[in-house]
Amino acid sequence: MPQEPIVKSVLTRIDGATTMSSDWKLRVRLFVQRFWQPTSACMTCMPGSWGNILSLAHWTTAVQTGLLTGILAVLLTFTPAARLYSNRYGNALLVGLLTMLGDAFSHVNHYGFPFAEAIVTGMISALITLVASWLFEDRARRLRAAWTRMSGH
């Protein structure tokens, strides 16, 4: 998905009144994206993930990881690091690192060595981000083309 520039003025002057600009819309969209990607990665990487798909505790941990990652991603839009969002690979790297932080903070490690689960979750989240950026770029033209081929239209 093409990344709009987020690093610009947050407030815009219109007729002498200060109003919120479209930057906040972009930040909300960024939060939503950075929420579902780590949440999905966390659901995938936790031990017993597919067996516990309906577990409230499992979902609580995954959502907490997603929320922390989303909040950190939005906070980074106020720094020069926001430029990484405009590059597909920089964006995936940043999301992977933020997911590792969110996962490490959200719950204890369930794997053998320290932070192993957070690292694996971050790598899966970065991969999901990279695949999503490729699939959804140009208003999801690749998905639309595949649907057209499958449906025969």
Image (cartoon, rainbow, N blue to C red):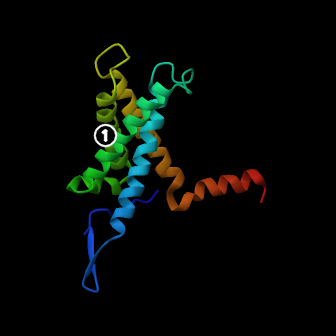
Secondary structure at numbered mark 1: helix
- In this view of the protein, which residue sits in the foreground, 26 or 56? 56
Q: What count of labels does the image hold?
A: 1
- In this view of the protein, which residue sits in the foreground, 44 or 153? 44
**Above or below: residue 133 compared with residue 95:** below
Q: In this view, does 91 lie to the left or right of 82?
A: right
Circle 1 crowding by C-alpha within 10 Å: few under 14, some 14–19, many from 20: many
The residue sitting at the top extreme is 112
- In this view of the protein, which residue sits in the foreground, 7 or 68? 68
Q: Which residue is drawn at 65% across and 57% down?
A: 145
Please state which amino acid type lies under the numbered disc 1: Leu
Q: Is residue 35 left or right of residue 53?
A: left
Q: In this view, does 29 lie to the left or right of 74?
A: right
**Quarter of the figure with the C terminus:** bottom right
Picture coordinates of residue 102, whole percent (x, y): 32, 35
Q: State which quadrant residue 38 falls in.
A: top left
**Above or below: residue 131 compared with residue 7:** above
Q: Residue at x 27, y 67 (%)?
A: 10
Q: Residue at x 41, y 29 (%)?
A: 61
Residue ID for mark 1: 98
The residue sitting at the right extreme is 152
Q: State which quadrant residue 69 falls in.
A: top left
Picture coordinates of residue 134, whole percent (x, y): 50, 51
Picture coordinates of residue 105, whole percent (x, y): 29, 30
User: Is residue 4 at all visible to an observer of this figure?
Assistant: no
User: Is residue 140 at all visible to an observer of this figure?
Assistant: yes
